[in-house]
Image: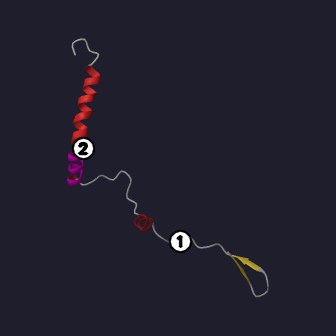
Amino acid sequence: MSETTHDGTVAVTAPVPPDEGLTADRLAAKYGLSVSGARPSLIEYVRQLWGRRHFILAFSQAKLTAQYSQAKLG
């Protein structure tokens, strides 16, 4: 940004960033960020685990089937 002064010279000023002076906590809150790798509470963890139970069962069965499909006695 530039402004003309009283003596006719041009003064160049840098624009102030909108996040100037904000702490890290306030910046995170402003943009909806959370701690990377933060663990959920026990209740939330159990809720997520229960929601993924079908995948867990199917994945474990598929893994065992693939592991033992080439076995002589399998």
Dot 1 amino acid type: Pro
Q: Secondary structure under badge 2?
A: loop
The CA span between labels 1 and 2 is: 41 Å
Q: Secondary structure under badge 1?
A: loop
Q: Disc 1 vs disc 2: which is toward the camera?
A: 2
Estimate the x, y position of residue 27 in percent, counting from the top left.
45, 66
Question: Measuring 26% from the left and 15% from the top, which residue is drawn there?
Answer: 71
Judge from the rendering whether residue 62 lies leftward or rightward of residue 5; answer left or right: left
Question: Measuring 56% from the left and 70% from the top, which residue is drawn there?
Answer: 17
Q: Magenta part of the protein: which range?
A: 43-52
Residue 52 is tagged as: 2
Q: Residue furthest top?
A: 72
Estimate the x, y position of residue 22 in percent, counting from the top left.
47, 70
Question: Measuring 40% from the left and 66% from the top, which residue is drawn there?
Answer: 29
Disc tally is: 2
Dot 2 amino acid type: Arg
Q: Quadrant of the C terminus?
A: top left
Estimate the x, y position of residue 15 in percent, counting from the top left.
62, 73
Q: Which residue is mark 1?
A: 18
Q: Quadrant of residue 54?
A: top left
User: If you read the primary sequence from the N terminus, does the residue marked by circle 1 or circle 2 appear first?
Assistant: 1
